[in-house]
Image: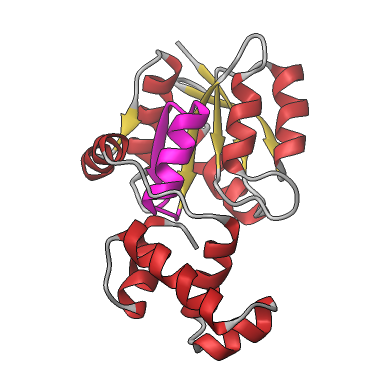
């Protein structure tokens, strides 16, 4: 049985390459291509693909996670399989929570993608073993919830800004910055600025 697929990626060369290796006319047939999330929604509503193979970062407009949620709200809803180069925990969990049926990295063999497409169409979950363990762990230990201001402080920390620079950039006092840092360290369970930045990058908080 042939599975119909809509490709969603903002790079034309990637879409061409995927079409070349996936569209075999027997198990997989590419029925459309989209460069943005908005275009994907329009095409999916018109073409009714079995599976949407979607990148996580889509340039301008809505991202892959937002696109996934919107696609899953369609009637009928296609299965959504994320195919990306990004493997940060926050993004994997975000995609699964948005309704994606799987998450694969672009460095896998074409056969793995084809198998994933067929499993997604059949309603199965598609995750590499190491990603699956991280999803399960992440669901049991949710990522800490930082405020928007704490995220701003973390981003400035990641650029190497000192407390005085952070205070000046955010128009707050140094005492306020120290208070934000104390909350960040507690939430991330770290005891240093470098460790906070490392954890934030690793988990996709920044």
Direction from residue 190 to residue 89 in the image, left or right:
right
* Rendered location of residue 202, percent (x, y): 35, 62
- Is 203 colored magenta in this rendering? no
Residue 103 vertical placement versus 191 (above, below): above
Let me know if residue 51 appears in the view.
Answer: yes
93 inside magenta stretch: yes
Q: Nearer the viewer, residue 34 or 76?
A: 76
| Residue 120 image point, x, y percent | 42, 22
The image quarter containing residue 188 is: bottom left
Q: Examine the rendered structure and indicate whether residue 189 appears above or below residue 196.
A: above
Could you tell me residue 111's position as x and y percent? 34, 37
Q: Residue at x 36, y 70 (%)?
A: 196
With 136 as the anchor, is 96 left or right in this view? Answer: right
Q: What residue do we see at 66% from left, 9% from top?
A: 75
Find residue 141 and report its image quarter: top left
User: How many marks are shown on the rendered structure?
Assistant: 0
Which range of residues does the magenta coloring cover? 85-106
Would residue 180 appear left or right of 87 to someone viewing this image? right
What scheme was used to colour the molecule? secondary structure
Q: Residue furthest front?
A: 175
Please say whether residue 161 is visible from this viewpoint: no
Residue nearest the observer in this picture, 159 or 31: 159
- Quadrant of the image for the N terminus? top left
Q: Viewer-proximal residue, 93 or 48?
A: 93
- Residue 122, image x, y percentages: 40, 13
- Which residue is painted at 63% across and 37% down in the image? 66
Decide: is 162 above or below 130: below
The image shows residue 181, relative to residue 112, as above or below, that is: below
């Amino acid at each position: 049985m042939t599975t119909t697929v809509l490709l969603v990626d903002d790079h034309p060369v990637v879409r061409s390459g995927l079409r070349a290796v996936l569209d075999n006319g027997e198990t997989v047939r590419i029925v459309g291509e989209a460069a943005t999330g908005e275009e994907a929604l329009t095409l999916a509503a018109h073409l009714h693909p079995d599976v949407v193979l979607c990148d996580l970062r889509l340039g301008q407009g809505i991202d892959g996670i937002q696109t996934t949620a919107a696609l899953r709200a369609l009637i009928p809803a296609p299965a959504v399989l994320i195919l990306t180069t990004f493997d940060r925990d926050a993004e994997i969990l975000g995609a699964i929570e948005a309704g994606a049926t799987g998450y694969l990295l672009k460095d896998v063999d074409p056969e793995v993608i084809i198998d994933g497409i067929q499993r997604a169409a059949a309603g199965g979950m598609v995750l590499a073993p190491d990603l699956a363990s991280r999803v399960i762990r992440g669901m049991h230990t949710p990522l800490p919830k930082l405020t928007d201001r704490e995220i701003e402080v973390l981003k400035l920390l990641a650029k190497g800004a000192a407390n005085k620079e952070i205070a000046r950039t955010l128009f707050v006092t140094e005492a306020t910055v120290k208070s934000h840092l104390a909350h960040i360290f507690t939430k991330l369970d770290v005891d240093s600025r470098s460790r906070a930045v490392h954890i934030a990058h690793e988990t996709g908080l920044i």
